[in-house]
Image (cartoon, rainbow, N blue to C red):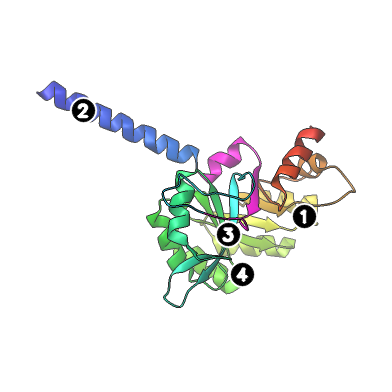
Amino acid sequence: MGKAALAVGVCVLAGTGLALHKSHADGLMARIHHGLVICSPGTGLSMTPGSTGLLHAASTPGMLRLQLATQENGRVVVVPGSNQLSEVLASSRRGHTLLMLDLNDTNPVDVAKLVRNARMRDRVVLVASDHETTEAALRADSSMMVAIPIHSTRDAYTAHRMAGRHPYAAYLSPSATPDLFALVHRDAEAIITENPHSAAFSTSKFFAERPVDIVVTEQPMQLTKALASDS
């Protein structure tokens, strides 16, 4: 009886360890470790009851950027449309999809609570619309990634001081200099930028000269093909 109980205990622990390993493997930092994460606006977001994950108008990239809003009843939803954030988070977890969430006028505390309940803390990036909301997002959860816009060397140092020990992502314009990218790379957990859309140099050269972890683009398939053709 004791051996049987021990065997069951070992199986449960092994299963738990496997689940934890899978969860970490799907996390943002693990994805970044394996290469560039391509993020696309979720304008074609749609869901079906009981679906295994998010459905997208085109092929779904590894990360979706979603716009949030608060309804009159206090529910946080994804716009355009009225999908509740709680349902989208659950669907995203099932579909192993990372999310970049634009807070807009929502309360970061409410959003952070929904993310925690969905066990998605390590799979989201919160994007604030202003300095005040950024500070509120940093206070809302101790480990949830928050994106901080950086346009200059001064911004870089300010962001580092504001974040403290909180993990943050530096959000840079594609027009920022390679030196600024290199500077923020020292302190930020991740670097976000947008597709450069420049004919001055190849896509692969742009990323070769700048440490980028997440790139936001409205044409994920085109960017993927461009990177493949340049390599």
Q: What amino acid is labelled 2 in the image? A: Val
Q: Which residue is mark 4?
A: 129
Q: Which residue is mark 1?
A: 174
Image coordinates for residue 130, horizontal then vertical, percent? 62, 72
Q: Seen from this angle, which residue lies furthest top?
A: 3
Apparent side of residue 164 relative to residue 212 in the rendered image (left or right)? left
Quadrant containing the C terminus is top right
Front: mark 2 or 1: 2
Q: Which residues are magenta?
A: 27-46
Q: Which residue is mark 3?
A: 66
41 or 113, nearer to the observer: 41
Residue 189 shows up from this direction: no
User: Is 28 a magenta residue?
Assistant: yes
Number of residues whose C-alpha sits closer than 10 Å to that of mark 4, classed few (under 14), some (14–19) or many (20 or more)? few
On screen, residue 187 above or below 108: above
Give the mark nearer the N terminus: 4 vs 2: 2
Q: Residue at x 47, y 61 (%)?
A: 85
Q: Which mark is residue 8?
A: 2
Give the mark nearer the N terminus: 4 vs 3: 3
Front: mark 1 or 3: 3
Callouts 4 and 2 close, C-beta under 8 Å: no
Distance from disc 4 to disc 1, alpha carbons, whole Å, reads 19 Å
Q: What amino acid is labelled 4 in the image? A: Ser
Give the mark nearer the N terminus: 3 vs 2: 2
Q: Residue at x 21, y 28 (%)?
A: 8
